[in-house]
Each structure stands twice: as C-alpha cells, then as structure tokens.
Amino acid sequence: MKKILMVLGIISIVGCKKEKKTEEIMPLKVGNYWNYQRIIVEDNDTTLKDIFKMNVNYQNNDTFYLIGSLFTFEELPDKPEEETTKVIFYENFLFTYTDDKSDTQLILPLKEGNSWKVNEEFTAEVIGIEEVNIGIEKYLNCWRIKYQNEEGDIQKELWFKEGIGIVKFRREENGEITNLELKEYNLN
C-alpha cells in the first residue's frame, strides 16, 4: 500500500509539472547581454574574427528590443548597434520582427522532431538535446534547432541552454561556415 501511494504521489508531481516558458529558453530582460566569438571557416582555412554582441536594450510590455540578434543573423554588419530586432512572446511562440516582418523563431514546448515554418524562406526543426563544449565550458542539455531554406543552400543552427539562451550559432552558405560561440554573458 505504501509503494502504491508513493508511486501515485510521484505521478501526480510529474503530471503537474509546468511547461517551460519562452523566458526560460531565452531569458530576455533589459541589460542582459551575450558576447560571442566569431569564427569563419572558408576553403578549410579557419579565421578568428571579432566579438559579436547581442543585448536587450529596451522593453515595452511583452516586446523586447535586441541589438545584434542571432535570430535574424544573416551577415554581420560593420555596425551591429544600428540593427535592432523586436522579439515578442505570445503564448508558446517567440516571434522576431525586422522591418516589421514576422518570423516564428520558436514554438514551445521544444520537442525533438517538431518543425515549423519560420518565414517564407526558412523551416525550423528541433533536432534534439546535445552537450555543447566551448573551450573549457561545458553546456549540458542544450536544445539544437536547425533552420534551412527551401533551396537547401543555407543552413543555420542554434543551440539553446535553458536559463542562459543561445550558446552556439552556426551558419553554412556557399562553402563558408560561420560559428559564433558564447564567450561571456550577463543576465539580470
């Protein structure tokens, strides 16, 4: 009888577990920032570039404004502080807006195999949970999400660590690979 009550207690605790909120996947608060080291591989030649910074500089209700967003990363501009991306949480969705065009970046809860249309060009798929090693840092249980365009010639991948955000970004296009790896972050 004690074993049955214990099993029922465990089942009820597990069954009542809350779904993860978008804020836990990507913690956005004014003042939060993430610095990434940019590494480019072209023709088997690796070049260590600069530091790419993404930061939350403004909030209006459920809308956050990011400078240097990895969600919409296409090419690193010379002056990333001039490019701002709006990020909006709505129920289980995370939308980004650049030039007032909406992209569905995440649909929660994340589950291996789930996929969705990001915009007219890209589709996203949750690949699974992986360990990400960056230098001496080890990030366990990171969600890997792959974004691919219709033609298949552009692929992007993001690795999210719950409570930290994006720890790694990879973009491959025309034989050039751009990696951004988390070097430093500050969460308020």
Image: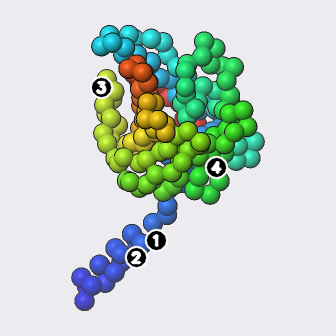
Inter-mark Cα distance, 2 to 4: 29 Å
The mark found on residue 16 in the picture is: 1
Label 1 crowd bin: few (<14), some (14–19), many (20+), radius 10 Å: few
Camera-side residue of 48 and 186: 48
Q: Earlier along the polypeptide chain: callout 3 or callout 2?
A: 2
What residue occupies the far front of the structure in this picture? 151
Label pair 2/4, CB-CB below 8 angstroms: no
Q: Quadrant of residue 10?
A: bottom left
Disc 4, SS: strand
Residue of label 3? 136
What residue occupies the far right of the structure in this picture? 60
The mark found on residue 3 in the picture is: none
Inter-mark Cα distance, 3 to 1: 37 Å
Please tell me whether mark 2 or mark 4 is closer to you in this view.
4
Residue of label 4? 89
Inter-mark Cα distance, 4 to 3: 33 Å
Residue of label 2? 12
Q: Earlier along the polypeptide chain: callout 3 or callout 1?
A: 1
Q: Is residue 26 visible?
A: no
Inter-mark Cα distance, 1 to 4: 23 Å
Name the kind of residue labelled 1 in the image.
Cys
Q: Is residue 7 visible?
A: yes
Name the kind of residue labelled 2 in the image.
Ser
Q: Is residue 90 left or right of 182 when viewed as pictured?
A: right
Q: Earlier along the polypeptide chain: callout 1 or callout 4?
A: 1
Q: Position of residue 115 (x, y in %)?
A: 46, 52
Inter-mark Cα distance, 3 to 2: 39 Å
Quadrant containing the N terminus in the rendered view: bottom left
Name the kind of residue labelled 4 in the image.
Phe
Name the kind of residue labelled 3 in the image.
Ile
Q: Is residue 17 left or right of 106 when viewed as pictured?
A: left
